[in-house]
Image (tube, rainbow, N blue to C red):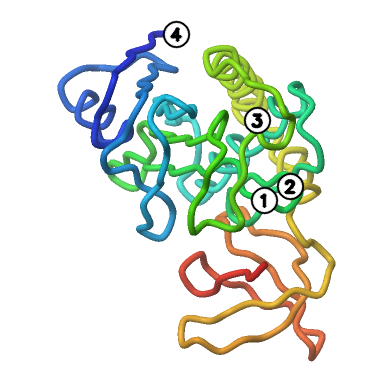
């Protein structure tokens, strides 16, 4: 495991991707930064983080063994590695808000951004960006955000968290490489936020509807039981789950 530590960068994902175009990266090459000037999240959002209070890093993983249609298993593996790590640090009431926001007590503590390298409809590598709220205590304008320190009342060591996350990534990627997809999918679905509970969703055109989350497909579409007893599938950009 090779770790590159930066004081500041625009985005650890961008830095690692640029590095991968110039060099052949070893598995679990990691870039961490105390501060990001242009951190990115899902759906084109920005990831806001106070300097040197949180864990911000990206990791390169060779996923050439994975079929292209099973790309969402990368997200499942990463989510489960984070859940397991946070359990080891006694963070309570953990869940995964589809597709891969990590929640504790219904508050977001971690975001994930995955960017894959695809050549001729096959995977090469993936860059997994992780932003974990560790010791930040103020989240102005973000009522659904929290941190490990706010939850536990304890100042936590980001380096220790990083090593545990990478260890758990290795564990779950090993399960994926040995084709334990059913186990991974069932475990991931078991942590889904609001699974089997009446939930409100907003469509692209702004309409609200209710349904019950049932699970996900291998490609990452969410499966929702609607009022007419039909299970519908939606892609990430098609709907938003409201708190």
Instruction: Tell which of 113 and 157 is nearer to you.
Output: 157
Q: On the image, numbered disc 2 is attached to which residue?
A: 95
Answer with the quarter of the image where residue 150 lies. Answer: top right
Q: CA distance from mark 2 to mark 1?
A: 10 Å
Instruction: Locate residue 40, reporting x and y percent.
Output: 35, 47
181 or 147: which is nearer to us? Answer: 147
Other-residue count near label 1 (Cα within 10 Å), few / some / many at <14 / 14–19 / ≥20:
many
Of callouts 2 and 1, the N-terminal one: 2
Calculate the distance from the C-alpha at mark 3 to the C-alpha at mark 1. Answer: 13 Å
* SS class, disc 3: helix
Give the CA distance from mark 4 to mark 3.
27 Å
In three-dimensional space, the C-alpha distance between marks 2 and 4, rounded to whole angstroms, equals 28 Å
Task: Residue 53: give x, y in percent of width and height.
Answer: 47, 27
Classify mark 4: helix, strand or loop: loop
Which residue was labeled with disc 1?
107
| Residue found 72% across the figure and 53% down from its top | 106
Please name the residue shown 43% across and 42% down the image: 114
Sequence-earlier tag: 4 or 3: 4
Task: Residue under label 3, please give it.
Answer: 149
Which one is earlier in the sequence, the residue at label 3 or at label 2?
2
Q: Is residue 130 left or right of residue 155?
A: left
Can you say whether 22 is above or below 39 in the image? above
- In the foreground, 184 or 46: 46
Query: Which residue is identified by label 4?
Result: 1
Q: Give neighbour class at mark 3: few <14, some 14-19, many 20+ (Cα, 10 Å).
A: some
Q: Is residue 157 above or below residue 145?
A: above
Location of residue 153 by image quarter:
top right
N-term mark: 1 or 4: 4
Q: Position of 226 compared to 30: left or right?
A: right
Residue at point 49%, 74% (across, down): 238
The quadrant of the image that shows the N terminus is top left
The mark closer to the camera, 2 or 4, is: 2
């Amino acid at each position: 495991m090779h770790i590159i530590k930066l004081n500041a960068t625009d985005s650890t994902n961008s830095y690692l991707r640029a590095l991968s175009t110039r060099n052949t990266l070893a598995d679990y090459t990691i870039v961490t930064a105390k501060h990001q000037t242009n951190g990115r999240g899902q759906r084109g959002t920005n990831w806001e983080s106070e300097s040197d209070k949180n864990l911000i890093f990206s990791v390169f993983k060779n996923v050439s063994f994975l079929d292209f249609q099973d790309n969402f298993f990368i997200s499942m593996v990463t989510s489960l590695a984070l859940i397991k790590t946070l359990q080891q640090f006694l963070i309570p009431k953990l869940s995964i808000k589809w597709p891969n926001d990590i929640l504790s007590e219904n508050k977001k503590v971690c975001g994930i951004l995955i960017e894959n390298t695809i050549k001729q409809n096959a995977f090469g590598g993936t860059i997994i960006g992780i932003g974990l709220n560790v010791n930040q205590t103020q989240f102005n304008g973000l009522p659904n955000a929290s941190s490990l320190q706010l939850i536990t009342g304890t100042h936590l060591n980001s380096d220790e968290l990083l090593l545990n996350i990478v260890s758990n990534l290795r564990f779950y990627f090993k399960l994926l490489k040995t084709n334990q997809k059913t186990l991974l999918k069932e475990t991931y679905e078991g942590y889904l936020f609001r699974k089997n509970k009446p939930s409100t969703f907003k469509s692209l055109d702004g309409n609200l509807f209710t349904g019950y989350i049932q699970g996900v497909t291998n490609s990452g579409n969410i499966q929702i039981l609607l009022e007419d007893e039909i299970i519908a599938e939606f892609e990430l950009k098609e709907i938003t789950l409201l708190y």
